[in-house]
Image (tube, rainbow, N blue to C red):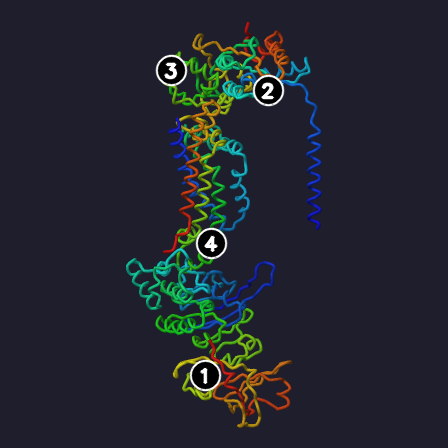
Amino acid sequence: MFEARIQMRLGSGGKNPFEVDVSLSSPGGITVLFGHSGAGKTSILRAIAGIRNPDAGRIALGDRVFFDSSSGQSLPVGRRRIGYVFQDQLLFPHLTAEQNVLYGARDRSRHRARARVAELLSTLGVARAARRLPGELSGGERQRVALARALASDPLILLLDEPLSAVDVPTRTRLVEEIASIQRRSGIPFLYVTHNHSEAVRLGDRMYVIDDGRVVQTGTPLEIFNAPRSAPVARVVGTENVFAGEITGHNPEDGTMTVDLGACRIEATHADLAAGSRVTIGIRSEDILISREHLTQTSARNVLRGRIRRVILQADKAELVVRCGVDFKVSITPATVRILGLESGTEITMLIKARAVHLLA
Amino acid sequence: MRRERFWKKACAILVCCLVSAACFRAPREREILVSTAISLKDAFEELGELYERQSGVAVRLNLGSSGVLQKQIEGGAPADVFASAGMRQMDVLESAGLIAPGTRRTFARNRLVVVLPSGSPLELESFEGLAGPEWARLAIGNPQTVPAGQYAAEALEHLRIWDRLQARLVPAGNVRQVLDYVVRGEVDAGFVYASDVPSSRGKAVIAAAAPEGSHAPILYPIAQVRDAASPGEARAFIDLVAGGSGQAILERHGFLPYR
Amino acid sequence: MIWNALKLSLLVVGIATILIGLVGTAFGYLLARRSFRGKDLLDAVLTLPMVLPPTVTGYYLILVLGRRGLLGGPLYALTGWTVTFSMGAAVVAATVVALPLMIKSARAAIESVNVEYEVASRIMGKSEWETMLRITLPLAGRGLLAGLVLSFARALGEFGATLMLAGNIPGRTQTMPLLIFDAVMAGEDALARWAALILTAMSVAVVYATNRLSRPRKRA
């Protein structure tokens, strides 16, 4: 069980001091830290790694205490058995891929270390890049080597700081699946920092939304994306409805395909992916029209009847959380809420064009 | 715009300064340049002041070891007078025709002594005593260019201890440097002229003098350089040095008179 | 005569360069990676021999290491030995004068290495010492080498401080620059010319070789 309570004040002397005050825990699996840049996510990771100690708090992995301000304990960086994957990989430019990974290995015997390194490189699909320098590798290859290096030291927990932000979309899709499978096989908890919806959904067993140095909501990624509990959270997660689903069929004449979200089926624009593919789709909350009456003769490919679960009213906009199998965020004007007399429990119809349902990368 | 104006002003001021400096040269007072062996420094400073008082002509000293001064004159240095601590250097210039004929005079003598740092725990009674093992470092003017060093080498050879002392010698560029090494305590003893000792203000003491006949007599020649800019003044200065008042001053500075 | 001076120069500068490399890199690392009270003062003091005229540096060296010096005095009383007028003095003079060059170069080279690499290494469990040896210094390699070459050249040509602390003793402390000085003073033009030529050729050779070595390796 990983637990962290971190309080610290950041900000280079004079400038706006920035306070971080968070409480996290992870029983295992992948925990996502989600937020905009500057929200403090990286600082939290670095505090956990021991690069910069918090002003107050406690960080422990099981009975291994990394830091405890009340007792003055602080385990040195090198003894925490942490693996860290940096945003820009930070592979040592003067060492080959193999040497980079070997650098982290802790094995007593050289022979065993080399064997492990070879195994790691091949698991991550970069065995052929072993003798090359980082400068000669592609972005995706570099990221894989960085992962291998972090895993080579046999860590007890892996910290990943936006590892896929500099990688192109097709590679990112593949790497996400690989990261998930690596975590399953290694069994150690992962702390994964990102501001990408798709990564969060595909990887996160649970998610913490960080805003302005504080945790503003926790839950599963899908829960949070589609049912933000407050305006700040809504601001951070954006107005996308994010769903994980599976393509069940294509309708070539219509130019659409059917995506099964589990509790709901959606028609999306046709994409060149085989039936059975797992996808993440997004629908902007502004793109959903609603009607109190049930309409059938419309141009929308998706006509869904659902029940309002929550109304979030603000001065200039309003948001509804509507359940139709899954929870949808719908963005409308406050006037509409008044005029249509919308409140929690009201049944309404949602109209969504297939074009408005897009594939998230 | 402002930048440009600043630089223009700066240039103008600089030019003005340079021009006025060029125009404002001090009126060339008459002076002679005397290339002087270092051991003559204090004596010649006083002689120069005396000459200036009497004739209104300033005397500027160019100090160095005699060998170096000789090379300078060979190389065309603009000296009016050459006062050397060794005959050899003057002989070389004379045979090269660089000395105005008939102007060479010998004007002083000196003694070679060995000095110790004051407060040195070691004791010495004669030059021969230097052969003892406790004398680890001995300063000597470089015999190639420093007359005092030549004389010392001669004396040590005469006493048959030159070979034995070879490895312990620390050569110096001129005789005052020898004295400096002794005063600083960097060496155990050094070979200088008796006339050099007073300038150490007691920090170096004479332990022994070179035995009679162990080296050629130390004679100081002076002459006018052939291409002197002021030959008349040069000869007048030489007359002063070799004359009564000059000799008195030299004696006061530890030199022996030459008659 | 020339061979003696040449051998001596090579020996003195060789030893000096090794000392400069070690001490210079150490100070460069300290100034680049640590902060402590008095850091700027230390930097200023270490830079001093570079900006002072060599004769002034020589003067201070005598003050400290001479037979009656601050450190030399007690040393002489204890062991009966001083460094002045020995080959060691030539090494000391060359090292002191060229050290600031190495320190400045090393500091700049190390500062140019991304600190995050060191962070990554520490997280992987390596000590600061190991990180410095395996990551920081190799990455700063080019700059360190450049600094070493500069220092070598400075040490090779060192004259003023050497003359004052080590004297000009043929066979023992007469390095090439001192030999050339003597030769010119004594009017031995041929000797001076040859010595100068050899010294120039040596310096050019070293600089050339180093430039070749530090060129990035061509990719196959």
Q: Is residue B202 above or below residue A87?
A: above
- Kindly indicate whether the residues beneath marks 2 and 3 are on one polypeptide chain: yes
Question: How far apart, in angstroms, are the residues tagged by discs 3 and 4?
Answer: 63 Å
Q: Residues within 10 Å of mark 2 (few under 14, many from 20)?
A: many
Residue B135 appears anywhere in the view = yes
Residue annotated with mark 3: B161
Q: Residues within 10 Å of mark 1 (few under 14, many from 20)?
A: some
Indicate the chain on which mark 4 is placed: C
Of circles 1 and 2, the one toward us is 1
Of circles 3 and 1, the one toward us is 1
Q: Is residue A87 above or below residue C170?
A: below
How many labels were placed on the picture? 4
Indicate the chain on which mark 3 is placed: B
Residue annotated with mark 1: A270
Image position, residue A252 (x, y; %): 43, 87
Q: Is residue A128 above or below residue A180?
A: above
Q: Say which amino acid is labelled 2.
A: Leu
Q: Say which amino acid is labelled 3.
A: Ile
Question: How far apart, in angstroms, are the residues tagged by discs 1 and 2?
Answer: 104 Å
Residue B61 circle label: 2
